[in-house]
Amino acid sequence: MKNNSNSNNILLLCQAALIAALYIVLTFLANAMGLANYAVQVRFSEALTILPFFTPAAIPGLFVGCLLSNILTGCALPDIVFGSLATLVAAILTYKFKKNKWLAPVFPIAANAIVVPFVLLYCYGIEPLWFSFLTVTAGEIISCGILGMLLLFTLQKHAGRIFHQA
């Protein structure tokens, strides 16, 4: 039984690491296209925020991926801290409410729509605040709501094989 538990822990650790790495790569891709930062943000990596629907490994994976992405793309310290915490809270809530797949994108959209506009204002001086609420929410709806749900429906067909818990 202990061996099975160790196998499961290793599987979850590997899944978390892969999710973090994928989040970073997708953030860099969006950043290279000018989509990952400032008032209008369509981070492809945000589509991954639906992954706690499938595995608890996505919670640390998304948090670490967001944290490292924000550090590596040169974000301001409050952006690194509060943006990553918003992702963490959203991932935890997505996992807790995983019985309803339609809620999977709601928590990441809401967390980022609330936190990121204030970060943009106080860290980068992007005004007006109401416009940032509008643009960040729109970007999150595209990233999490549309791309994330497309990812969820695609992964759902193979979830047993992809996210199998040993």
Image (cartoon, helix red, strand yellow):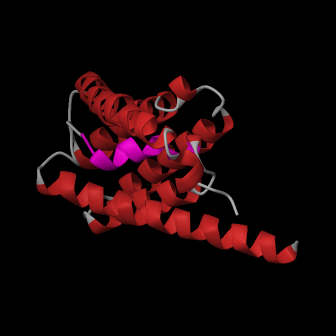
Depth check: 81 or 108 in front?
A: 108
Depth check: 32 or 76 in front?
A: 32
Taking the image as shown, residue 146 lies to the left or right of residue 107, namely: left
Instruction: Indicate the position of residue 44 as horizontal and vertical percent values.
Output: 28, 46
Q: Residue at x 53, y 40 (%)?
A: 90
Q: Which residues are magenta?
A: 42-52
Q: Residue at x 28, y 39 (%)?
A: 121
Instruction: Indicate the position of residue 154 as horizontal and vertical percent values.
Output: 41, 39
Q: Residue furthest right?
A: 1
Q: Is the residue 158 above or below the residue 4 in the image?
A: above
Quarter of the rendering containing residue 60:
bottom right
In the image, is residue 139 part of the stretch drawn in magenta?
A: no
Q: Mainly helix, strand or loop, the magenta region? A: helix
Quarter of the rendering containing residue 21:
bottom left
Q: Is the residue 104 above or below the residue 88 in the image?
A: above
Instruction: Indicate the position of residue 80 as horizontal and vertical percent values.
Output: 39, 57
Q: Quadrant of the C terminus?
A: bottom right
* Residue 147 appears in the picture as rendered: yes
Taking the image as shown, residue 101 lies to the left or right of residue 18, namely: right
Q: Is the residue 116 above or below the residue 57 in the image?
A: above
* Residue 75 appears in the picture as rendered: no
Q: How many marks?
A: 0
Q: Quadrant of the N terminus?
A: bottom right
Instruction: Indicate the position of residue 52 as horizontal and vertical percent values.
Output: 56, 45
Q: Residue at x 28, y 30 (%)?
A: 142
